[in-house]
Amino acid sequence: MEENEILLMKGNEAIAHAAIRCGCDGYFGYPITPQSEILETLAVEKPWETTGMVVVQAESELASINMVYGGGATGKRVMTSSSSPGVALMQEGITYMAGAEIPGLIVNVQRGGPGLGTIQPSQGDYFQSTRGGGNGDYNVIVLAPASVQEMADFVDLSFTLAFRYRIPVIMLSDGVIGQMMEKVVLPPFKPRRTEEELRQECPWAANGCKNRKKNIVTSLELDPHAMELHNIHLQEKYKEIKEKEVRYEEYMTEDAEYLIVAFGSAARIAQKAIELCRAKGIRVGMLRPITLWPFPSQAIKTLAQKAKGILSMEINAGQMVEDIQLAVQGCVPVFHYGRMGGIVPTPEEIVNEVEKMKQ
């Protein structure tokens, strides 16, 4: 593949190729629909022969997240991927990583639930990702790609944020974005770090060395006072992330009387619905959260001051709508529309919901 070459590939395939190019040191995963192409693409590309990237099909999701825990603890750029029920199994490992401040990337290509559910697309893991499915007071950064290009671009961004803040990052995709094919330009190859560069970037990393200070990376602390201090440190870090790393995109909000808030594949549907509404003379705009955590609360609050109503459009029973309601604090009516069971809404359905808001 040539530099800046325009390619046609699935979102899952784009993640795999981007991981190879972005200096990822290791991938540990387990196949599950609709994200299996990530592991399959890596197996075909054999990056261990070209970049030295380790690729392991673990025996389970539990094993894969603990491999990510171990690799990340040594300062390596490591990642895993799964789908909704598989990520549910990973929650213990994710909270351990958050507590130990270990960077890493977890890709979730969502499918319908609860339980094993369906292999069709869903956005039902919003709570699982943004609220933290594990124990304790912790957060992880959550990025929501809405295109195959963003699936590729967000790999490097995820590693950048993960190491900047020593925090796990979840890329929350879904079966639509993972399986659809679009044009994409892959990122340029980034050289893997030398051991000296790794030591300089990650002086905290576990090293097992006898000739210098041995770093121990753990989330365990038996002294409650020390544990409270550690939690205070984590909360201060999360506050900094909320101040510096909020990302979102606005679409036709300048004159909008009604606002749609949607992320991922739902935002693509909402964009078409807005075009249909505009053709009917209904001034509708959209705010697309790119970071689901930290959530763009202030941006939504600002837009709400000139809106007559807000529609939270999600492919679930209503999860992000709670964050929107907290953001606007009752200054404007907030509605929700979503489908479940793996059914994806149509733009016409969204137009009908906007028309109901006007009544």
Image (cartoon, helix red, strand yellow):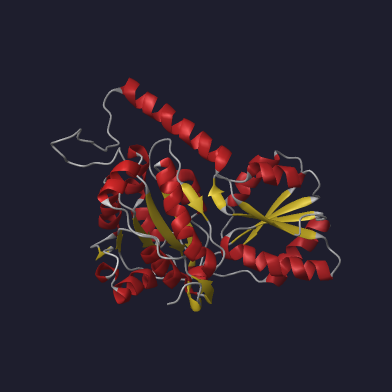
In the rendered structure, the answer to whether residue 303 lies left or right of residue 176 reads right
Q: Is residue 249 above or below residue 224?
A: below
Quadrant into which the N terminus falls: bottom left
**Residue at the image position 78 percent from the left and 43 percent from the top:** 305
* Position of residue 117 measured from the top left corner of the image (x, y, whole percent): 43, 65
Residue occupying the far right of the picture: 281
**Residue at the image position 76 percent from the left and 40 percent from the top:** 331
**Residue at the image position 55 percent from the left and 64 percent from the top:** 340
| Residue 339 seen in this snapshot | no
174 or 342: nearer the eye? 174
In the rendered structure, the answer to whether residue 232 lies left or right of residue 198 reads right
Quadrant into which the C terminus falls: bottom right
* Position of residue 118 measured from the top left corner of the image (x, y, whole percent): 44, 69
* Position of residue 29 measured from the top left corner of the image (x, y, whole percent): 31, 62
In the rendered structure, the answer to whether residue 150 lies left or right of residue 58 reads right
| Residue 90 seen in this snapshot | yes
341 or 22: nearer the eye? 22
Q: Is residue 117 above or below residue 137?
A: below
Residue occupying the far top of the picture: 225
Query: How many numbered marks appear?
Result: 0
Q: Quadrant of residue 259?
A: bottom right
* Position of residue 182 measured from the top left corner of the image (x, y, whole percent): 54, 76
In the rendered structure, the answer to whether residue 77 lies left or right of residue 138 reads left
